[in-house]
Amino acid sequence: VSKLKSGGTARAGEIEKLEQALFGPGFMYFSNSGIDTEKLMEDMRRFFSLPLEQKMRSAWSDPADNSGYVKVGGEGLDEDSAEGDPKESYDMNKDHLSTSTWKNN
């Protein structure tokens, strides 16, 4: 974020990286946020290593809520592909986050 506050080519380069992470294949990693990332990664590894049947108990089911587990092939973000995406995910909105087990962790 500090490079976004600067000017010139450093700022332009950071904006390009941010756009790639948000709009293309990639991800973002925030540091110095105060969030215990080790605990978060441990929780994610534990959840995604569960059998599918257990993960499906937390399945995304309400389009208005837009939160929960999505199995491999459960989303098709590529409009040109008949197959679902080769990924699984767990989406959370703010309300879901504050009313789930994540609230106290």
Image (cartoon, helix red, strand yellow):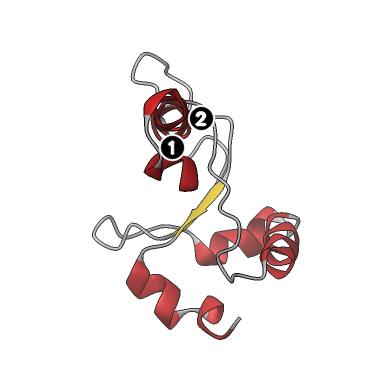
Cα–Cα gap, marks 2 and 1: 6 Å
**Does residue 18 sit above or below 82 in this rendering?**
below
The dot on residue 3 is none
Q: Residue at x 41, y 79 (%)?
A: 98
Most foreground residue, 17 or 68: 17
Question: Would you say 87 lies left or right of 51 here?
Answer: left
Q: Are marks 2 and 1 in contact (CB under 8 Å)?
A: yes
Q: Amino acid at mark 2?
A: Asp
Q: Residue at x 58, y 39 (%)?
A: 72
The dot on residue 85 is 2
- The number of numbered discs placed on residues in the rendered structure image is 2
- Rendered location of residue 43, percent (x, y): 70, 67
Question: Would you say 89 lies left or right of 7 here?
Answer: right
Question: Would you say 13 lies left or right of 55 here?
Answer: left
Question: Would you say 71 lies left or right of 20 here?
Answer: right
Based on the displayed image, in which of its 4 quarters is residue 76 positioned? Answer: top left
Lower sequence index among marks 2 and 1: 1
Most foreground residue, 104 or 21: 21
Q: Amino acid at mark 1?
A: Glu
Q: Residue at x 30, y 63 (%)?
A: 65
- Rendered location of residue 103, percent (x, y): 50, 81
The dot on residue 75 is 1
- Rendered location of residue 40, percent (x, y): 66, 65
Based on the displayed image, in which of its 4 quarters is residue 48 positioned? Answer: bottom right
